[in-house]
Amino acid sequence: NAGVMQNPRHLVRRRGQEARLRCSPMKGHSHVYWYRQLPEEGLKFMVYLQKENIIDESGMPKERFSAEFPKEGPSILRIQQVVRGDSAAYFCASSPPGSSSYEQYFGPGTRLTVT
Amino acid sequence: GDSVTQMEGPVTLSEEAFLTINCTYTATGYPSLFWYVQYPGEGLQLLLKATKADDKGSNKGFEATYRKETTSFHLEKGSVQVSDSAVYFCALKGDNTDKLIFGTGTRLQVFP
């Protein structure tokens, strides 16, 4: 059973470009979470999605950031017009539906560098 | 709001030494508590968890006990190995939320 998959693992973008980060949850998992880790800091929650629904986006910056989890395909975190401060590691986690949702399984992360 | 405070690192130990990494939390209600480990260049792996007061989570020689009276969840290991070198994150999940709140992480370096 493959774990949570994220791609690309490393992404370099120039200021003003768009970044698209993909996350495929574990098989059977329908809950996806995105976290951001700035250098030398802990992870900060960004958004929690279920299929076709955003459940909690309280950690998402108000501008330039969006996330989706379509019925088919991976979850996408999209950052428009990237700035240097967006450079970070972005981690996706997934959990199964139901009462065990407190256990989240993390992917390897996408390391975004904005030049 | 809910928060987690961890001791700052790095923690530097010799192999076979005793390890303690302190973690305290602030939360309303009855949160679940977790320790995650991050090896260089990798994502986070769940190390252990506890979901109610006085529960002890354990895995790979690591232990942590959920102490509600002191709002703590300290990580301990009796004898560390070089392979335990990593960053350790304490985290909580509140009663009415699905998001994890992380501490800032503690880097552990174990030397032979």
Image: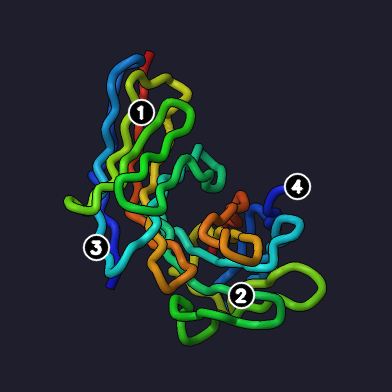
From the viewer's perspective, is residue B18 above or below residue A85? above
Q: Which residue is mark 2?
A: A49
Disc 2 residue crowd, few under 14, some 14–19, many 20+, Cα 10 Å: many
Q: Residue A2: which numbered mark, if any?
A: 4
Q: Nearer the viewer, residue A2 or B111?
A: A2
Q: Which numbered disc, 2 or 4, marks the residue that appears first in the sequence?
A: 4
| Residue name at image x 70 percent, y 60 percent | A25
Q: Amino acid at mark 1?
A: Gln
Which of label 3 and label 1 is nearer to you?
3
Left/right placement of residue B1 relative to residue A107 reads left
**Parent chain of label 2:** A
Left/right placement of residue A42 relative to residue A52 reads left
How far apart are labels 3 and 2 at the CA level? 26 Å
How far apart are labels 2 and 4 at the CA level? 20 Å
Q: Are marks 4 and 3 in contact (CB under 8 Å)?
A: no
Q: Amino acid at mark 4?
A: Ala
Residue B57 place in picture, x, y as percent: 41, 40
Residue B2 place in picture, x, y as percent: 30, 68
Left/right placement of residue A113 relative to residue B21 reads right
Disc 3 residue crowd, few under 14, some 14–19, many 20+, Cα 10 Å: some
Element type at mark 2: strand
Element type at mark 1: strand
How far apart are labels 4 and 3 at the CA level? 35 Å
Q: Residue A19: which numbered mark, if any?
A: none
Q: Which numbered disc, 3 or 1, marks the residue that appears first in the sequence?
A: 3
